[in-house]
Image (tube, rainbow, N blue to C red):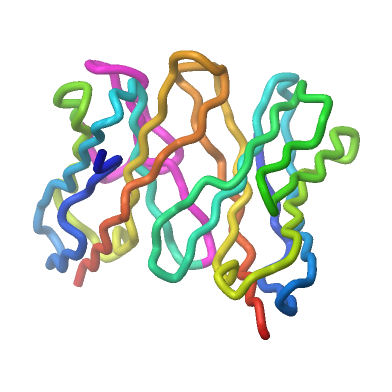
Amino acid sequence: AQKITQTQPGMFVQEKEAVTLDCTYDTSDQSYGLFWYKQPSSGEMIFLIYQGSYDEQNATEGRYSLNFQKARKSANLVISASQLGDSAMYFCAMREGYYNTDKLIFGTGTRLQVFP
Amino acid sequence: NAGVTQTPKFQVLKTGQSMTLQCAQDMNHNSMYWYRQDPGMGLRLIYYSASEGTTDKGEVPNGYNVSRLNKREFSLRLESAAPSQTSVYFCASRKTEGQLFNEQFFGPGTRLTVL
């Protein structure tokens, strides 16, 4: 069965420093996608970044990058130059299924706190 | 565009009561989803609808029913609420044309408490 594991319940980082949030996954599919979402204290889910299993380059979106290591089945989120507004829960998710019927499997999340 | 909207934002029910959570999206997306979020457990899929007129069970469908009323609207019904259904409920939608992997857009959530 497909599974997402986030082993860090909480992380602290100082403002302007970089931080890595870990995510490992388990799947027997050859084609899959990995997503990161941010959930601030207000509760909404905000899409950050996506990596496809066949993408050769690591995904980047502004200060967010995804360190994708396929052989190790890891898809860690790297946030560079942390800001106070980055304090939130971060969820790693994996796409299960094909095209129209795809679903997301979520990890349990990591709470990131950025301090001045 | 409002994106994905959900009503109500908060609801308190007594055990055995029924209610329907409403979700609508104005992005012309084909696929829609209902998740629940419990503390420490991330989001879990309840039901999804790949297109108008179709619905399928997700990971935790027991105690829920859904209706894909049209392309815009996807409702979640609790026929007889139980305390175990106390949770935050999120609706999401996704575009299925174009790129193979499109992200899901989430609504603001409904916080439901069952006493």
Residue at 26% across / 57% down in the picture? Answer: B110
Q: Quadrant of residue B25?
A: top left
Between B76 and B29, the one lying in front of the other is B29
Q: Name which quarter of the figure residue A96 lies in.
A: top right
Residue that appears at 77% across and 21% down:
A54
- Residue A76: tell me if it is visible: yes
Kindly tell me whether residue A12 is visible in this rendering: no
Residue A48 at x, y = what percent? 58, 47
Q: Which residues are magenta?
A: B40-66
* Count of all numbered marks drawn on residues in the image: 0
**Where is residue A32 shown, x and y percent of the image?**
67, 26
Q: Pick the residue in front: A81 or A59.
A: A81
Q: Specify whether A22 is left or right of A36.
A: right
**In this view, which residue lies farthest toward the bottom?**
A116
To which quarter of the image does residue A82 belong? Answer: bottom right
Percent coordinates x, y for residue B39 in the rendering: 47, 67
Which quadrant is the C terminus of chain B positioned in? bottom left
Image height check: is A75 above or below B51?
below
